[in-house]
Image (tube, grey):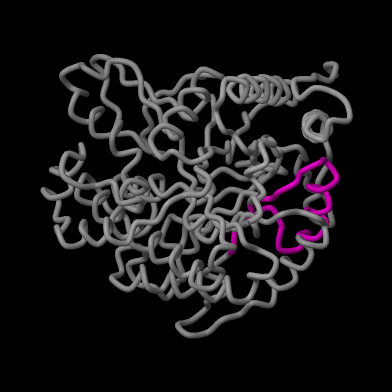
């Protein structure tokens, strides 16, 4: 008999992530973004991993800077990743590898729109799995593919700066093809050992969805949030709500058939949810373009929104679900309140039968907002207070200063682990407020 995989034992595991957005392409008025560089993770990686383990994290969602390890076609530089992977495992963390968390190599002209993109990203995934497959078997082929598609294909905000419905369709098709080929590439190396954690943003829309000025756009967005995952998992066929949109924007029937014939499935369906930002509001009589530069207003949907997105993605894809990113940007007290409330909601949903296998606070330490790309000011102007550890500027670089959110995370992680071992406590236990 095949032994159960780690997520099949019924436990809720607590983990962390380190923000790893990479948009290395620059142009006039736009700086490159590399969160590892901004947060000095390239320097402090070993310390960061030890901090994650020390607060009770069992797994770490951790991304690979593809653009750095592939500085030129056919050239591979694994030196820093070798060191980081060794340190990550030494810290006792289970890595869930973000193979693509935005960004492509600088030499890949046209980025996601390059016709060679799907094969290039699959080659990179294959090489990574060959090199690290003994210590890393959990993979996210592409983090938040619909955010990729929106930012790079519809909003014109990130390379290759596509716009409109045609742009988002083109980038979605390319991302989905790369997604499928990546998963097959990793499977060809690891076989049944490979575990795939698909991850997308828990996008929600509310308000005047039926208003004349919003009806068409809102209907498309509600369906479109699943588009890349639906393509990759072979769900786009006759009767799919976006089939006509895809065909009208140039999607060839033979490519759509290829997706169905080569479909991949998640072992775990990950959903990223931020209570204050994941729910966009359509307002009667007011038009917003959507996107980072011209956002629709959002509101704090709290645990109601969390329950909604986990249910939606579970029911649609049928795999166990994981909360793969969550936090609030705010004071320590606000962070702790959301941590308590969201863990309690996860416990409630699990008690009701939803197979939730993981909870991920994102990120371990603070990060810098993507607005840094369009600014000329210092990184400190773009600090987002989100972490268990504060980033503090010092003469010797960025210090990681533990705050009480880390203590609360550690409490929840420990309580759930002890409860699952039958030794003491309850998974709903709460520590006293600081």
Q: Where is residue 162 in the image (x, y as percent from the top left)?
A: 27, 53
Residue under the point 72% across and 43% down: 365
Check the picture and name the quadrant holding the N terminus.
bottom right
Residue under the point 15% across and 59% down: 252
Which stretch is magenta?
39-64
Magenta stretch contains residue 48: yes
Task: Check the image and name the residue furthest to the bottom.
Answer: 74
Question: In the rendered image, which quarter is residue 108 located in?
Answer: bottom left
Q: Where is residue 429 in the image (x, y as percent from the top left)?
A: 80, 20
Residue under the point 48% across and 81% down: 72
**Relative side of 243 to 309, left or right:** left
**Relative side of 332 to 219, left or right:** right
Residue 63 vertical position relative to residue 279 in the rendered view, above or below: below
Residue 210 vertical position relative to residue 278 in the rendered view, above or below: above
Q: Position of residue 139 (x, y in %)?
A: 56, 58
Q: 111 or 344, which lies in front?
A: 344
Residue 206 vertical position relative to residue 174 in the rendered view, above or below: above
Magenta stretch contains residue 290: no
């Amino acid at each position: 008999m095949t032994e159960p995989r780690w997520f099949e034992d019924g436990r809720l595991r607590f983990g962390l992530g380190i923000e790893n957005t990479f948009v290395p392409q620059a142009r006039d008025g736009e700086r490159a973004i590399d969160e590892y560089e901004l947060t000095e993770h390239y320097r402090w990686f070993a310390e960061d991993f030890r901090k994650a383990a020390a607060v009770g994290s069992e797994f770490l969602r951790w991304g690979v800077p593809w653009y750095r390890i592939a500085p030129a076609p056919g050239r591979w530089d694994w030196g820093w990743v070798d060191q980081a992977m060794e340190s990550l495992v030494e810290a006792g963390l289970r890595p869930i590898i973000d193979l693509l968390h935005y960004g492509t190599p600088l030499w890949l002209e046209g980025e996601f729109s390059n016709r060679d993109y799907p094969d290039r990203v699959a080659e990179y995934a294959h090489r990574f799995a060959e090199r690290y497959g003994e210590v890393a078997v959990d993979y996210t082929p592409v983090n938040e593919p619909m955010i990729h598609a929106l930012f790079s294909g519809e909003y014109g905000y990130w390379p290759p700066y596509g716009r409109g419905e045609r742009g988002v369709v083109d980038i979605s098709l390319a991302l989905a093809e790369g997604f499928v080929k990546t998963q097959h590439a990793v499977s060809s190396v690891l076989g049944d050992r490979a575990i795939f954690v698909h991850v997308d943003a828990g996008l929600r829309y509310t308000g005047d969805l039926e208003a004349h000025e919003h009806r068409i756009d809102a209907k498309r967005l509600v369906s479109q949030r699943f588009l890349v995952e639906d393509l990759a998992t072979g769900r786009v066929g006759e009767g799919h709500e976006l089939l006509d949109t895809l065909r009208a924007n140039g999607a060839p029937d033979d490519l759509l058939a290829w997706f169905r014939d080569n479909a991949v499935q998640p072992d775990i369906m990950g959903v990223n949810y931020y209570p204050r930002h994941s729910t966009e509001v359509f307002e009667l009589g007011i038009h917003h373009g959507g996107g980072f530069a011209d956002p629709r207003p959002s509101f704090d949907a709290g645990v109601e929104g969390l329950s909604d997105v986990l249910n939606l993605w579970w029911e649609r894809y049928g795999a166990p679900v994981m909360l793969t990113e969550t936090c609030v940007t705010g004071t320590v007290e606000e962070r702790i309140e959301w941590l308590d409330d969201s863990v309690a909601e996860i416990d409630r949903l699990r008690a009701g039968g939803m197979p939730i296998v993981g909870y991920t606070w994102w990120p371990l330490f603070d990060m810098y907002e993507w607005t840094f790309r369009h600014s000329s000011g210092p990184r400190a102007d773009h600090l987002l207070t989100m972490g268990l550890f504060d980033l503090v500027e010092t003469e010797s670089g960025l210090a990681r200063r533990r705050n009480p959110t880390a203590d609360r995370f550690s409490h929840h992680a420990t309580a759930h682990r002890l409860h699952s071992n039958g030794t003491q406590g309850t998974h709903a236990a709460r520590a006293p407020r600081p």
